[in-house]
Amino acid sequence: MRRCSFYIHLVIKLPSELEINSLIDDLRTFSWEAADVLLYYSKIVKDSKYKSNILENDNSEDPVTIADLRVNELIIQRINEKYKDVDWEILSEENVKIESENCDSRADWMWVLDPLDGTKDFIQGTSNYAMHLALNYKNKPYIGIVLIPEKDQLWISNVENVWCEKRDGSLIKPTPPNNKNLKEMVLVTSKNHGNETLKNLIQKINFKEVIVMGSIGCKITSIVRGESDIYICLSLPGKSSPKDWDFAAPEAVLKSAGGAITNLDNQELTYGKSNFEQGGIIVASNNNLLHQSICLEIKEIIKKYDLYPLSHLN
């Protein structure tokens, strides 16, 4: 396990005098329950005869399945039943679509849930989907859970450490950060959410290798496993962007493993905005000591080839 370098994490107390190891034990139980739900519907979606039965809408840009809703309901119910007297809020991708279910973004403690990150990949029958669950304190990820059911992996960041558990209790250790320069890196990029600007940037950088993968959680954990080194998320001005629930849990996992995730100006991600958006250009890398120089190099390439309106980042 890798010790977290952020001292603020070591002095914050959980609400209602909760003990962190007990909380992690409960989250582990909740997560494997969610895995069972996702794997059940994953089998259905792989059968073309029944795939349409689990779709809740026909929106190709933002699809929702029964699996999204069932896991959303399960996790929220488990948290509310177990911790009914604890003062925290729950922000969920599915619930923000219901105005009456919106939470108070001013709360000190907030769960941030994406019951099914990578819904398009899930529908396509790939293994690249995940559940994200983060506990944010004052709009910063504090605890992070990234569950990848098809890989039998549960990534947990418990403030000081990060590790991956399989269902049988065996552990997968994070890969230590490396010192590769930008062109030596393996990039992991999106399967369903790319754009021509990002493709052009990737070509200009000329990475050693490019891996295509769905789900931000799957991409970030591929960095922590050492299969890739860097992830770049580029949202075009005026177009849809990832949201808080896409990044909160993966950020907690990556940072605890010695990596970093920021915008292109090396500023930390801001959570709790009214639209929950994480727009612009976001860079995640496996070494927080080299991260700033990596961002600067990418920014210089963008400037040189005029690939993106950098004024929109300010």
Image (cartoon, helix red, strand yellow):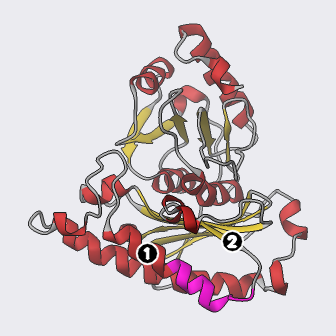
Does residue 46 appear in this view? no
Residue at the spot of label 2: 89
Magenta stretch contains residue 22: no
User: Would residue 46 be found to the left or right of residue 146 on screen?
Assistant: left
Q: Is residue 128 above or below residue 311?
A: below
Q: Which residues are magenta?
A: 75-85
Quarter placement of the C terminus: top right
What amino acid is at disc 2?
Answer: Glu
Q: Is residue 195 above or below residue 219?
A: above
Image coords of residue 29 (percent x, y): 53, 86
Does residue 193 appear in this view? yes
Give the number of marks: 2
Residue at the spot of label 1: 71
**Gap between marks 1 and 2 measured at Cα:** 17 Å
User: Would residue 221 be found to the left or right of residue 142 on screen?
Assistant: left
User: Would residue 202 be found to the left or right of residue 50 on screen?
Assistant: right
Q: Is residue 231 above or below residue 67?
A: above
Q: Nearer the viewer, residue 311 or 177?
A: 311
The crowding category of the residue bearing disc 2, from other C-alpha atoms within 10 Å (few below 14, some 14 to 19, many at least 20), is: many
Quarter placement of the N terminus: bottom right
In which quarter of the view is residue 99 placed?
A: bottom right
Q: Residue 108 — which label? A: none
Q: Nearer the viewer, mark 1 or mark 2?
A: 2
